[in-house]
Structure formats: structure tokens, C-alpha cells
């Protein structure tokens, strides 16, 4: 058996402080990582938005976004949806949230026919105000 002396003397007490410097270092690194990656996150479906000179809108509520790809594919938020299903789904969503803004994100190469068809469906669903999402001039 081991018969050595104890590491602690009777007069010495263990240190009761926690060193928070490594914790602060890790938190600062995580903060920097999130600050760098946050602008890279995009919302919705990948479409090439047209350029337009318009001021950015300030909103507190996340809007209902309808994305239209150049081939005519429709997305409600990030979910693919058929043209026939668009109006009933939007009516159901707007019944719960009456003042929810509706935006259309149309690809720059989308034929106007697709955008006009969606706007007509929105009008038939009782939605009078529709915003068109664009990119600022490059």
C-alpha cells in the first residue's frame, strides 16, 4: 500500500474560485462565428431577384413570402405549392393572422405571366396589398 503524505496540509485550504477566463474566450469566439455566418443565411427559395431603387422596409412581423422561380415553380415560404393550392392556403393563414403582410419574390427572369397569375389569385383570396421583393441596385 501507498503510505505517502497527503497533497493537502492541514493549514492549506483548496482554492474556491472558478477561473472564468477560458469561458469568456470560448464565448467571444462563438460570438464572432455567429456574427460572421449570420449574413450568409438566406431566407426562402433561391431566386435571382430583379434590381430596383427602393428603400428597405422595416418590419417587426415576418411576412408571408411567395417565391416564383423562372420556370414557374411556386413556394409558400420554403414549401413547394401548386397554383391551385395557393389561394386556399393563404386564406387559411390570413384567417389566423389578419394583418400578415404578403410579399412576392419573383426571379428576375420569371415571365410576367407567372407573377400576374399569382397576383390575380391573391386578389381573389381577398388580399389587396402585396409587396414585390427586389434587390437594391448593384
Image (cartoon, rainbow, N blue to C red):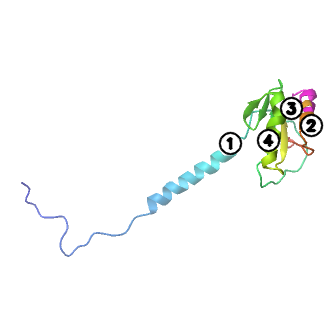
* Crowd band around label 3 with a 10 angstrom C-alpha radius: few (<14), some (14–19), many (20+): some
Label 2 and label 4: CA atoms lie apart by 14 Å
The residue nearer to you, when weighing 127 against 132, is 127
Q: Residue at coordinates 12% horizontally, 64% vertically from top-left?
A: 5
Where residue 97 appears, as percent x and y from the top left, is 79, 50
- Mark 1 lies on residue: 40
Label 3 and label 1: CA atoms lie apart by 21 Å
Q: Is 29 colored magenta in this rendering?
A: no
Judged from the image, the secondary structure of the residue bearing numbered disc 2 is helix
Label 4 and label 1: CA atoms lie apart by 32 Å
> The magenta stretch spans which residues?
109-116
Label 1 and label 2: CA atoms lie apart by 36 Å
Q: Which mark is residue 108?
A: 3
- Mark 2 lies on residue: 124
* Crowd band around label 2 with a 10 angstrom C-alpha radius: few (<14), some (14–19), many (20+): few
- Mark 2 or mark 3, earlier in chain: 3
Disc 4 to disc 3: CB gap under 8 Å = no
Q: Is residue 2 left or right of residue 61?
A: left
- Residue 76, by quadrant, is top right
- Select label 4 or label 3 by which is in front: 4
Amino acid at each position: 500500500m501507498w503510505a505517502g503524505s497527503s497533497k493537502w496540509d492541514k493549514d492549506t485550504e483548496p482554492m474556491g474560485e472558478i477561473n472564468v477566463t477560458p469561458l469568456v474566450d470560448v464565448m467571444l469566439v462563438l460570438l464572432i462565428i455567429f456574427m460572421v455566418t449570420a449574413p450568409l443565411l438566406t431566407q426562402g427559395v433561391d431566386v435571382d431577384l430583379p434590381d430596383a431603387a427602393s428603400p428597405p422596409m422595416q418590419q417587426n412581423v415576418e411576412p408571408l413570402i411567395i417565391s416564383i422561380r423562372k420556370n414557374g415553380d411556386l413556394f409558400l415560404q420554403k414549401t413547394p405549392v401548386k397554383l391551385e393550392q395557393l389561394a386556399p392556403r393563404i386564406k387559411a393563414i390570413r384567417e389566423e393572422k389578419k394583418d400578415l403582410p404578403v410579399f412576392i419574390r419573383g426571379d428576375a427572369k420569371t415571365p410576367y405571366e407567372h407573377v400576374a397569375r399569382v397576383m390575380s389569385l391573391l386578389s381573389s383570396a381577398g388580399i389587396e396589398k402585396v409587396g414585390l421583393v427586389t434587390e437594391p441596385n448593384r
